[in-house]
Amino acid sequence: MPSLAAISKIEFPFKTDQQSVKEYAKGLFSPSFPEVVRMLSAFDNTEIITRNLCKSLDYYSQVHSFQEQNLEYIRLSLEYSVQAIEDCIATAQISKEDITDIIFVSTTGLATPSMDALIINKMKLNQHVNRMSIFGLGCGGGVSGYAKACTLAKANADAVVLFVAVELCSLTFLRDDFTKSNFIGSSLFSDGIAACLIVGDNYANKAKSKISFLANESKLYFDSLDIMGWNFTDSGFKVLFSSGIPNIIANNVKHDVSSFLAKNNLEISDIKNFIFHPGGKKVLTSYEEALGVEGDFLKTTREVMNNYGNMSSATVLYVLERFFTHDFEDGYGLMMSMGPGFSCEMVLLQMTKQ
């Protein structure tokens, strides 16, 4: 079975407490957005304590063209992806020449040649690495990308699959957009970069702890295309998300999880480790009420949300990294995230301490 050999994440040098971001946003929005004082409580309602930001706060007070922001996305994505990958390689004690595949997932910037090509060139990886660059999965990209990496490793016992998720959400902030959606986005979204090395059976001994892939499933909900995503404007990426997201989760998640687990002869009570993308406070509450699992089963997910904010696809990998480096219970693990489409992504894991 494909196994997780290493995982690393980026702590940006401009990590900032939420109250500082709140006061900064108040100053930015107040002159042109009369509702700002009434809506400031949105920052507190997230329960975020610190935000992982790739730039200092003063950067966001200036108007930047889409070209300027996207060039900065490419520069920072490359710099910090390489750092995360090098950390992974060192932890796994696997040579970079052994990497057979690379999957790059992002929804917050554009690059052609794609970012995986830039990474291969910068690091001088094997020129014959199999490449997959995926755009547009949003918050669902972390679980979906992980599933695709594991599928490649399952097909090839000699595989060493590098999976990188990059989301620099703050670089999509539109300084002159005084809409409610842009304001709410400024209270929630952050930046994250994570890298994983997933290996086939012939490299299984390289895994620090045994986190193995068993199965995955995707689901797209019909007639929900306008729930989450981007509107592409002359100025850049304008965030689109609906207040109805928690209701969709509440109405579907128990059935979807139960159905997926039943296909693998399991029930929700068999899951010991819940590795969920947090989304936000209301999303976490919807998960908790719908699944009805005893105890604080989303504790690690909530801690990542509190300490980093919503980093889109990278967030669930920050949650996985905590399980990998800190502790988990022997037994089954479930990775889950929701994303544009509206869609659901799930991965079933076997987690055993070594």
Image: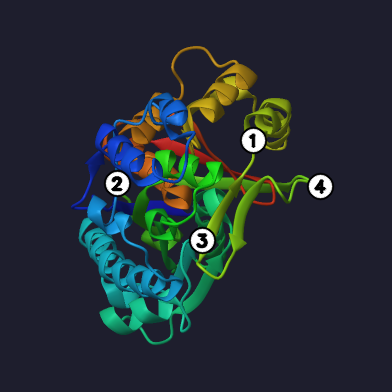
218, above or below 93, in the image: above
Density class for disc 2 (Cα within 10 Å; few <14, some 14-19, many ≥20) is many
Left or right, residue 16 beside residue 202: left
Give the CA separation, mark 1 to mark 3: 19 Å
Residue 306 in view: yes
- Secondary element under disc 1, as helix, strand or loop, is helix
Tell me the residue at 28%/73% (across/down). 96
Residue 74 occupies quadrant: bottom left
Density class for disc 1 (Cα within 10 Å; few <14, some 14-19, many ≥20) is some
- Three-letter code for the amino acid on which mark 1 is drawn: Ile
Q: Nearest the camera: 131 or 133?
A: 133
Residue 55 image offset from top left, x and y in percent = 26, 57
- Three-letter code for the amino acid on which mark 3 is drawn: Thr
- Identify the residue under disc 2: 52
- Identify the residue under disc 3: 107
Residue 310 in view: no
Left or right, residue 301 beside residue 123: right
Left or right, residue 122 beside residue 163: left
- CB of mark 1 within 8 Å of CB of mark 3? no
- Secondary element under disc 2, as helix, strand or loop, is loop
Give the CA separation, mark 1 to mark 2: 24 Å
- Three-letter code for the amino acid on which mark 2 is drawn: Asn
- Identify the residue under disc 4: 223
- Identify the residue under disc 1: 245
Residue at the bottom extreme, as displayed: 127
180, above or below 54, in the image: above
Q: Give the numbered dot on residue 38.
A: none
- CB of mark 1 within 8 Å of CB of mark 4? no
Residue 208 image offset from top left, x and y in percent = 28, 47
Q: Earlier in the sequence, mark 1 or mark 4?
A: 4
Q: Earlier in the sequence, mark 1 or mark 2?
A: 2
21, above or below 114, in the image: above
